[in-house]
């Protein structure tokens, strides 16, 4: 099940997470002791999986919330990203001692809702804290639904985007008079731009991690631009459009093998370092590396390009959930909703890490719009394509691992494109053939 | 003394013996009860946390048993076993465990023997430092050990790659490259668990009487012959114990891989225990 920027990334996150845990614990302890003893707020626990910069920003948001609500009494716990986090979250819920609030990726939401692991969000109650459906884009709100009910309060959307080195692209003649990238559309124009950037860097045109989940994310975006699903809506059948899949994967394979604008053997950290070191003109990745490049180089970010006639791009979304049985009484429920909505309103801090805020009051604010390059790709929130829903899919899941390892070969040259697609089919079919461990379908 | 008096004495002794016997039997019964009393706490814990879960586990294994939902528990007989045996992922994870066992066991046995011989030959005040140096890693918990090594293996600024690049060698993706990752796990395991074998050998070495060495030295045996014909045969018991313990420990491989690679990249370091963990907990499929 192991999760690959996540792999490189995850380990680092784990370390930082472990450190954060200590800090959060300390902070929680200190803050709790500052809380007024006469406070009626009950004590709540919040679990998340944020390490690194995200972890630090989450702690900033928690501290800001505490300053605004001195009576609030919460404890934040950071756990290792990915499968370890989700396994603990599920086991604690099954074992009837869940945290009161937790973070999930929306790509996992339908599985957890179908497994009866979540409390539906009480909309009238939520409205008392000033948060309603109108505070979210319809597309984002829709992703948090299961069986006609809201099961999560979205915090962000984090899409797969395009980074570029401004100096390299200027020399390659790819910028307009305002130093912005001229629009690039279609496979030929993109390949041409990558080749021109490659002439400038003398190394590669596009840096793209081949050895991690990036290949799956790229495939999911490109395939969605062509149109089509991978799994049936109930997550039980493999319905891949073979022609579209082949077209998308061939384009990807050509980048590394035929046109050689990208490196066929590079891991996640290496791909980030290539852009950072000026050895690549472009970089395809999730927006979350923005803070890595900030202050170290002249770069910019734009939405993932329209390659095949659509602006769809892979994304996922962090959201708050309330595990089943986490709000046994009104007082705990009030404290939990107050905490979640309080953090939600701090989304501007969160947006600095690159994530598009889901909360519209922030996403539409002048401050967010002034946040560059983070707000350049805000339009991706509406066109984001998440992992297909199934009991074995979602962020850091076994599905992501098998998809990645199937497609990877087509970029490294170990496998021809049709062979790679066959492997994808047979690997997913093996997951589909297992008995479904959920009491109901993932589409309700 | 006459014969009769002796016989009388014997009878008396017998009588006194039989008189004392019945309280003794009662006290033995009482002693048994006390014994049971002592092991009862352990027995209760053992039953609740080991025997009962094993029975529950066996029961679950015959059903389609989901951790998260009721209504999916249908009886499958040996269906789950058949599925596992047909699952290539099960075999590849079992193979990973076997590979680690086969690579690490000989190294752990031979290396700990060599180190204990070396340390045992050190005399004087510094001996404890050498003993401690090799045993110290064993005292770390798996979490601490994994944290230390994940820093050492770090691709960008880790100690190992730092050393390689300063020698002008290319850096290695210790934990993210298939093939290499498994060797990294073996390396870590050796560093971590060597100390225990080392200690067992060291204890064994100290039990070998000096006389045997002196006698063989008088017979003209050199250092190597003494090791070959005296030390190693006399350490046979320790070696057997170490090999058995080592194989058991290697087959239980989980913590290191879970913390360092999570079984990746692409399941290439996932041991069979993690396959079980993934199926049962991560994928909710307890049975």
Image (cartoon, rainbow, N blue to C red):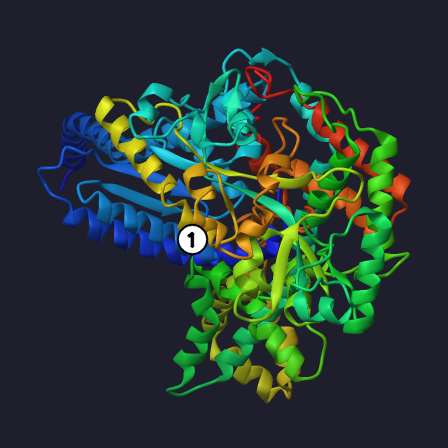
Give whichever of A437, A264 is nearer the camera. Answer: A264
Q: Quadrant of the C terminus of chain A?
A: top right
**Mark 1 falls on what kind of element?**
helix
Count of numbered marks: 1
Q: Residue A88 in the image: x percent, y percent?
A: 45, 37
Relative placement, left or right, of A389 versus A121 is right
Q: Chain of mark 1?
A: A
Please give left or right for residue A26 compared with residue A99 in the image.
Answer: left
Q: Residue at horizontal 38%, vertical 32%?
A: B46
- Based on the displayed image, in which of its 4 quarters is residue A38 positioned? top left
Q: Is residue A204 left or right of residue A24?
A: right
Q: Nearer the viewer, residue A256 or B155?
A: A256
Whether B184 is drawn above or below A363: the answer is below
Name which quarter of the figure residue A207 lies in: bottom right
Instruction: Tell me where residue A164 appears, x and y as whole percent.
Output: 67, 61
Pick the front one: B241 or A62: A62
Of all residues, the one furthest to the front in this rendering is: A177
Residue pictured at 65% horizontal, 22% vertical: B80
Relative to A341, residue B124 above or below:
below
Residue at the farthest left position: A38
Kindly tell me whether residue A281 is visible in this rendering: yes
Residue at (40, 22) in percent of width and height: A119
Q: Which residue is mark 1?
A: A55
Q: Position of residue A272 (x, y in %)?
A: 64, 62
Q: Residues within 10 Å of mark 1 (few under 14, many from 20)?
A: many
* Residue A124 vs residue A254, the one in the foreground: A124
Q: Is residue A326 above or below residue B164?
A: above
Quadrant of image for the N terminus of chain A: top right
| Residue A186 point in image, percent of width and height | 82, 46
**Res. A386 in view:** no
């Amino acid at each position: 099940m192991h999760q690959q920027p996540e792999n490189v990334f995850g380990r680092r996150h784990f370390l930082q997470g472990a450190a954060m845990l200590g800090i959060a614990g300390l902070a929680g302890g200190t803050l709790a002791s500052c809380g007024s003893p006469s406070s009626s707020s009950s004590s709540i626990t919040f679990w998340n999986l944020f390490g690194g910069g995200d972890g630090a920003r989450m702690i900033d948001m928690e501290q800001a919330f505490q300053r605004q609500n001195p009576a609030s009494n919460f404890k934040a716990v950071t756990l290792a990203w990915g499968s370890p986090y989700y396994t603990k979250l599920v086991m604690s819920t099954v074992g009837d001692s869940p945290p009161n609030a937790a973070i999930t990726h929306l790509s996992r939401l339908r599985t957890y809702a179908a497994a009866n692991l979540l409390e539906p969000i009480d909309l009238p109650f939520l409205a008392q804290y000033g948060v309603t459906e109108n505070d979210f884009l319809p597309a984002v709100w829709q992703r948090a639904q299961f069986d006609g009910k809201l099961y999560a309060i979205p915090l962000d959307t984090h899409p797969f985007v395009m980074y570029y080195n401004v100096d390299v692209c200027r020399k390659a003649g790819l910028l307009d008079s305002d130093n912005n990238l001229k629009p690039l559309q279609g496979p030929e124009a993109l390949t041409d731009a990558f080749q021109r950037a490659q002439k400038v860097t003398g190394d590669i045109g596009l840096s793209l991690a081949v050895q991690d989940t990036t290949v799956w994310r790229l495939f999911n975006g490109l395939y969605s631009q062509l149109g089509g699903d991978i799994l049936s809506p109930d997550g039980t059948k493999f319905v891949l459009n073979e022609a579209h899949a082949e077209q998308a994967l061939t384009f990807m394979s050509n980048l590394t093998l035929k046109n050689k604008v990208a490196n066929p053997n590079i891991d996640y950290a290496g791909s980030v370092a290539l852009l950072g070191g000026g050895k690549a003109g472009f970089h395809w990745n999730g927006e979350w590396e923005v803070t890595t490049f900030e202050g170290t180089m002249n770069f910019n970010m734009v939405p993932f390009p329209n390659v095949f006639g659509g602006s769809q791009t892979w994304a996922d979304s962090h959201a708050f959930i309330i595990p089943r049985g986490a709000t046994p009484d009104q007082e705990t429920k009030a404290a939990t909703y107050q905490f979640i909505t309080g953090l939600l309103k701090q989304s501007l801090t969160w947006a600095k890490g690159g994530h598009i805020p889901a909360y519209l009051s922030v996403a539409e604010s002048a401050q967010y719009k002034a946040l560059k390059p983070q707000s350049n790709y805000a339009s991706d929130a509406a066109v984001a394509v998440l992992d297909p829903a199934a009991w074995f899919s979602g962020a850091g899941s076994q599905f992501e691992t098998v998809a990645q390892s199937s497609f990877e070969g087509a970029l490294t040259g170990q496998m021809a494109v049709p062979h790679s697609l066959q492997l994808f089919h047979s690997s997913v079919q093996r997951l589909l053939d297992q008995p479904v461990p959920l009491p109901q379908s993932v589409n309700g | 003394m006459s014969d009769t008096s002796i016989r009388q004495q014997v009878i008396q002794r017998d009588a006194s013996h039989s008189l004392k016997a019945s309280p003794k039997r009662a006290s033995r019964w009482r002693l048994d009860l006390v014994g049971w009393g002592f092991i009862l706490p352990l027995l209760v814990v053992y039953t609740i946390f080991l025997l009962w879960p094993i029975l529950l586990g066996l029961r679950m294994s015959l059903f389609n048993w989901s951790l998260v939902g009721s209504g999916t528990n249908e009886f499958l007989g040996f269906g789950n076993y058949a599925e596992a045996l047909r699952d290539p992922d099960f075999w590849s994870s079992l193979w990973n465990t076997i590979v680690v066992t086969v690579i690490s066991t000989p190294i752990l046995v031979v290396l700990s023997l060599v180190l204990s011989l070396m340390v045992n030959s050190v005399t004087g005040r510094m001996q404890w430092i050498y003993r401690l140096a090799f045993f110290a890693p064993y005292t770390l918990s798996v979490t601490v050990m994994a944290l230390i090594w994940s820093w050492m293996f770090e691709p960008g600024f880790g100690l190992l790659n730092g050393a390689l690049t300063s020698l002008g060698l290319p850096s290695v993706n210790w934990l993210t490259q298939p093939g290499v990752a498994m060797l990294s796990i073996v390396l870590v395991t050796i560093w971590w668990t060597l100390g225990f074998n080392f200690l067992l050998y060291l204890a064994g070495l100290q039990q070998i009487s000096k006389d045997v060495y002196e006698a063989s030295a008088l017979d003209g045996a050199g250092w190597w012959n003494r090791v070959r014909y005296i030390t190693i045969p006399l350490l046979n018991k320790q070696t057997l114990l170490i090999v058995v313990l080592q194989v058991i420990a290697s087959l239980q491989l989980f913590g290191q891989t879970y913390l360092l690679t999570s079984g990746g990249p692409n399941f290439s370091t996932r041991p069979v225990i993690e396959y079980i963990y993934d199926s049962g907990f991560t994928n909710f499929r307890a049975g």
